[in-house]
Amino acid sequence: METFTLKPNFLGNILVRLVSFVILVFLARFAYIFTVKGNKSCNSGDFCFIPETLTISVELPDSGTGHRNYYYSVFQDLIADGYLSPNSQSLCIETLTGQDVAALIDIGVFDSMGIYNKSSQPFDDNTFDFEFAGNGVLDRSEQPVEFVKEVSRTLKPGGILVIHTIAKDNYSLNSLVQLFNNCKLVRSLEIDSYAMWQPSIRQVIFKKVTGLEQMDFKKSRNYCVVPEYKRELIRKAEGIIVKEPLKPWITLKRNLRNVKYLSEMVDISFKNRYIYVDVGARSYSSSIGSWFNRQYPKQNKTFEVYAIEADKEFHDEYRKKGVNLLPYAAWLRNETLFFEIMREQTRKSVEKGRGMGRVQSAQSSLNFVGDLNKILGFDFAGWLMSLVNEESDYLVVKMDVEGTEFHLIPKLIESGAICLIDELFLECHYNRWQRCCPGKRSTKYDKTYTECLELFSSLRDIGILVHQWW
């Protein structure tokens, strides 16, 4: 039988073609025309469009050329408006193909570079006059606060930052502005996008302020002023039920279908942390497990969950679920409290919050056999202010505290802690009509439905998106 052998030159040809293919793939990834001058450099790690008198020329595909022309037009307008100059040391952030860098060079801003997939910018402080974050870079960032810190560090005082974002509502714009505590908003406007699926985007322009300007700027801010866009969101929310329901346990439950959640009306992307606090949490399945985890629209964000529940009956359950448990009663200050604990027999009634071990406000009702129990109360408003950053955190609170809301809400308003809350779900306790006895009201609470309406209305009047809960 005749045998065949591969000739050395044949193997060599295969190797040459393979190497050539790898080089072409590599060059395709970095397809741009790019020139940089100066002595700035990038450290090792993912890639960085750079340095030192490096020039690469590669023909770009049509789609790339389209993006490049788009960025050329954007930068041309920025030059015309005085935000960019040919002498600006410029950086494009998270630029995959370098089309924005190429456009800067085309327009005459030669000292330009780009970075991609870097957790931190490999540059000295106060390096750049101009930084650009296009293509929804900040929208996709999982750590927006770290992103902002790096941009703020490397941008020179007086330097310009331009961000392109798909978020257009005023709530998200305000959240974005609050992330930059050493920059001031110069301009925000909608411009055309190069993506067919997204015909327009928002262009946001910031200017880095000096230390003195920053101090004056912060002094001028009233942290509890309610901007018009927040009032507009409240006007869009479901209406408060004005007429007292004859069967509140049915009416309020049905009202859940009408609730307009804040995270369904606005983009909540530009936040550092997402926090849910359940005050008077009862059992895990009564609220956190059955409602918040399953139904609250979270926009794929991971929330820190805190349960405030003084009743020891539920503590082990929360620990097993890995929920942050505060085994105290939310109160006006740190002190020992005496509450009446109602003792009934079924686990079902416990989960509803009316049974064994459920902490109730002190009362003298003959309908229950009461035990005086000593528990620890804590300064809820003070704790909230130590936990949450108003400017960068997103806070949702659910409150079911058996009538104590008429003490806690005024304290939250007085302390300013109420301003930390983005969305509040409040159960207001009043002398409801009783299920068992038509025409008779419960003597459990001394407040009326009218007083509950006043509480809800006052919260909405000061700019808090509050929902009636049951």
Image: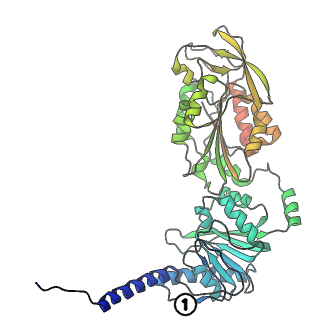
406 lies left or right of 167: right
Q: Residue at x 74, y 58 (%)?
A: 178
Examine the rendered structure and indicate whether residue 82 appears above or below residue 56.
Answer: above
Measuring 68% from the left and 89% from the top, which residue is drawn there?
A: 108
- Residues 463 and 134: in front is 134
Assign the N terminus to one quadrant of the image. Answer: bottom left
Give the residue number, with chain letter if any, for mark 1.
57
**Few, some or many C-alpha atoms within 10 Å of disc 1 (few <14, some 14-19, many ≥20)?**
few
Placement of 143 over or under 436, stated as above or below: below
Indicate the secondary structure of the residue bearing disc 1: loop
With 74 as the anchor, is 338 left or right in this view?
right
Image position, residue 106 (x, y; %): 62, 88
Q: Quadrant of the C terminus?
A: top right
Q: Is residue 9 above or below residue 304?
A: below
**Residue 9: in sight, yes or no?**
yes
- 183 or 227, which is in the foreground? 183
Left or right, residue 402 beside residue 209: left
| Residue drawn where x is 60% and y is 55% of the image | 267
* Rendered location of residue 296, percent (x, y): 55, 43
| Quadrant housing residue 10 | bottom left
* Image location (x, y in percent) of residue 104: 65, 84
Instruction: Report the colour scheme.
Output: rainbow
Amino acid under label 1? Ser
Where's residue 55, x and y in %? 60, 89
Q: Which one is nearer the viewer's eye here, 333 or 428? A: 333
Q: Is residue 462 visible?
A: no
